[in-house]
Image (cartoon, rainbow, N blue to C red):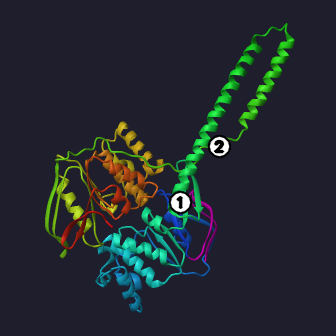
């Protein structure tokens, strides 16, 4: 149904993908994974002919199939439209009423939202309307770029069922490990090696968990074999070097009156050099070339167990004149890891902004905030180093560069403007900022959003071990399970404490 042959994509002199060939048939669910900035979104755009900033070569055969594309974030032009205008165009061509109401119910979407400008909706509502558009269009192949972003857990479960139930091929990018585990039957892993100077891709028809497990086993086995062979090689090399030094020493001291012994030593040295050549020509297993995981940690972040962090009481949670929720109470003492869940549009991001405003002026704690929409806080035209550095002395710059390097930022990314970073790289930028600012209270709105499934396990581990307070919003089921020790659901009637999300 869909074929790619020898596809290569490059930006200037840097290849993101080289000589990719694949065939998709019915029921194929291809998940594209990889670190931020490796070219996952560019690959989808390149296949669709929407990538003006990159050079695309190779053969793409859609075989006449209609492709539906869910982009990672809506364009500024689309954000100005109402839901109806976005789905049906400006011609008031609403001849899809049966389909429309069917899918509105399926997605648990209020039809009234379609009358609103998309920019006024929550992140999850925007994603749902984008999916609604694809469903109504009845495409033959679906390209989905981070479809789980901002979706509530109910819709995430629906999305998994939707992907699994579709016969048409689906290619999707996702950071959501639960979704990947439950849906993918093919994996395309895009890597950038040697400080992003060399690209690599792995394409296998296996499920996600099998891929991760087998990849780790392969890396560990090859690493062990390579180290063992290198140790053996070094032993042989050292032994040969010592013998050659002894022979060379004897050659230098032998008397001219003993030509026979000199000749024997010459022959022996010739033999030793032949052994050296043979040894150097041996093919030994190399250390596997793969993209290393990120690394970071919080220094000295601590909140005493009796410390009062928050005593919040909100009669009405409003956006403009619309009441989203009532009677919200939240008391936090000590180094709790709080996670707030809830349906899209219920006001979670609005609530967490209020919490941040309540806490940010406190002098007895150091509060850090990671918003859902990064551009709310970031100056996209600011240099990455300038964003992280306050003193701008040599010592600070060196430290910041080290943290950026541990997060797999290249030198060009460090020196470049924030606007050039991917969403996942911006998320990592915020995490570094929280570390450098020595925050002991973290307010995080979807902290694992946009971050690769390769990096997310590291982030979860660090946050789980964080000795300060975390107040977060997340629908990442692994994050909730591993990091949160208290879960609340925000409803129209306030916050409800949950034992689990099941």
Q: Residue furthest right?
A: 260
Look at 51% across and 57% down and name the residue there.
212
- Would you say 426 lies left or right of 2 here? left
Q: Is residue 450 magenta?
A: no
Label placed on residue 285: 2
x then y, percent, for residue 74: 40, 72
Numbered tag placed on residue 337 in the rendering: none
Which corner quadrant of the image does residue 470 belong to? Answer: bottom left
The residue tagged 1 is 210
Percent position (x, y) of residue 479? 36, 58
Foreground label between 2 and 1: 1
Image quadrant containing the N terminus = bottom right
Question: Mark 2 or 1 closer to N-term?
Answer: 1
Toward the viewer: 310 or 434?
A: 310
- 225 vs 123, nearest the viewer: 225
The magenta segment: 1-26
Q: Quadrant of residue 158?
A: bottom left
């Amino acid at each position: 149904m869909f074929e790619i042959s020898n596809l290569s994509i490059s930006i200037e002199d840097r290849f993101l993908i080289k000589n990719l060939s694949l065939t998709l048939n019915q029921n194929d669910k291809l998940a594209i994974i990889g670190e931020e900035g490796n070219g996952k979104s560019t690959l989808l755009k390149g296949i669709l002919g929407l990538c003006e900033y990159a050079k695309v070569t190779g053969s793409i055969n859609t075989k006449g199939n209609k492709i539906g594309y869910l982009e990672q974030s809506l364009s500024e032009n689309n954000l100005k439209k109402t839901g109806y205008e976005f789905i049906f165009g400006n011609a008031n061509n609403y001849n899809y009423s049966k389909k429309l109401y069917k899918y509105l119910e399926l997605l648990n979407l209020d039809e009234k939202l379609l009358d609103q400008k998309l920019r006024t909706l929550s992140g999850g509502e925007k994603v749902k309307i984008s999916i609604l558009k694809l469903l109504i269009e009845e495409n033959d192949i679906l390209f989905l770029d981070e479809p789980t972003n901002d979706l509530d857990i109910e819709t995430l479960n629906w999305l998994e069922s939707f992907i699994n139930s579709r016969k048409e091929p689906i290619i999707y990018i996702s950071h959501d490990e639960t979704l990947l585990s439950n849906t993918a039957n093919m994996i395309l892993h895009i890597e950038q090696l040697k400080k992003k100077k060399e690209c690599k891709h792995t394409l296998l028809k296996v499920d996600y968990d099998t891929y991760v497990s087998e990849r780790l086993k392969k890396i560990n086995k090859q690493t062990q074999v390579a180290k063992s062979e290198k140790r053996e090689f070094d032993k042989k090399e050292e032994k040969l070097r010592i013998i050659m030094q002894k022979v060379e020493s004897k050659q230098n001291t032998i008397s001219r009156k003993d030509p026979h012994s000199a000749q024997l030593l010459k022959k022996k040295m010739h033999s030793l050099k032949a052994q050296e050549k043979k040894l150097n020509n041996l093919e030994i297993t190399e250390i596997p070339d793969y993209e290393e995981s990120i690394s970071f940690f919080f220094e000295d972040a601590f909140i005493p167990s009796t410390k009062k962090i928050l005593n919040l009481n909100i009669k009405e949670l409003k956006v403009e004149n619309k009441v989203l929720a009532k009677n919200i109470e939240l008391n936090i003492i000590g180094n709790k890891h709080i996670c707030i869940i809830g349906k899209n549009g219920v006001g979670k991001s609005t609530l967490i902004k209020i919490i941040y405003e309540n806490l940010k002026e406190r002098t007895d704690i150091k509060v850090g905030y990671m918003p859902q929409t990064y551009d709310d806080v970031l100056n996209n035209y600011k240099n990455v180093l300038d964003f992280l550095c306050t003193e701008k002395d040599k010592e600070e710059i060196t430290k910041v560069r080290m943290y950026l390097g541990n997060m797999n930022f290249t030198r060009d990314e460090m020196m470049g403007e924030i606007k050039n970073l991917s969403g996942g790289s911006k998320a990592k930028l915020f995490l570094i900022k929280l570390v450098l600012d020595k925050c002991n209270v973290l307010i995080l709105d979807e902290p694992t959003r946009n971050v690769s499934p390769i990096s997310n396990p590291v982030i979860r581990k660090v946050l789980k071990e964080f000795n300060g307070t975390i107040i977060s919003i997340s629908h990442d089921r692994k994050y909730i399970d591993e990091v949160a020790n208290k879960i609340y659901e925000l409803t129209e009637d306030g916050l409800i404490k949950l034992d689990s999300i099941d």
